[in-house]
Amino acid sequence: MFFALGLWSTAVAASATRDLDAHFFHPSFGDLQEELAMARTEGKAGILVMFDNAECLWCAKMKATVLNQVTVQDYFRKHFRIIQVDTEGDETLSDFNGVELPSRRKSGRSSKP
């Protein structure tokens, strides 16, 4: 998905931009079952979960060049409930089976482009 959004970024580069927290991400309950139920109640296709952290340069680039675009935000908010999970955060996240998982994930992989 990030690849497709990256290609789309060149087409929308001249578009107006908006703040991500106010216009892209939804407030999260930390429970994927609840998030999906809310999305279905709202008539959306499902949920989109963005896993990122402050040190992820690719995440920052996506936020600064694609996800801040009005056309991108409007499309995804129309079709999905969008939540953000900080992979370095202390919050827990309940999966679709109700199992609580720490959002923190130490992958050992570089987030540098």
Image (spheres, helix red, strand yellow):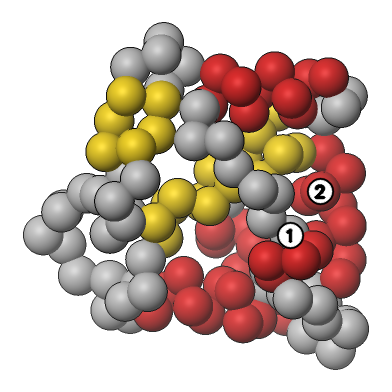
Q: Kindly identify which numbered label has been placed on residue 24.
A: 1
Q: Residue at x 53, y 52 (%)?
A: 84
2 or 1: tag closer to the N-terminus? 1
In screen coordinates, is 33 left or right of 11?
left
Disc 2 residue type (three-letter): Arg
Pointer 2 local density, CA inside 10 Å: few below 14, some 14–19, many at least 20: some
> How far across and how far down the image is residue 49, in percent?
54, 43
- Residue 37 image offset from top left, x and y in percent: 70, 18
Looking at numbered disc 1 in the image, what kind of residue is underneath it?
A: Phe
Residue 1, image x, y percentages: 57, 50
Q: Quadrant of the C terminus?
A: bottom left
The foreground one among 110 and 4 is 110
Decide if residue 59 is in sight here.
yes
Q: On the rendered structure, is 30 left or right of 13?
A: left
* Structural crowding at the residue carrying mark 1, measured as other residues with C-alpha within 10 Å and reported as few (<14), some (14–19) or many (≥20): many
Which one is nearer the viewer's eye here, 19 or 80?
Answer: 19
What residue sits 86% from the left and 52% below the top?
75
Q: Nearer the viewer, residue 63 or 88?
A: 88
Q: Is residue 11 visible?
A: no
Q: Are marks 2 and 1 in contact (CB under 8 Å)?
A: yes
Q: Which residue is mark 2?
A: 77
Secondary structure state at the residue bearing disc 2: helix
Give me the residue at 41% from left, 13% from top: 98
Q: Tell me the SS state at disc 1.
A: loop
Q: Is residue 33 left or right of residue 27?
A: left
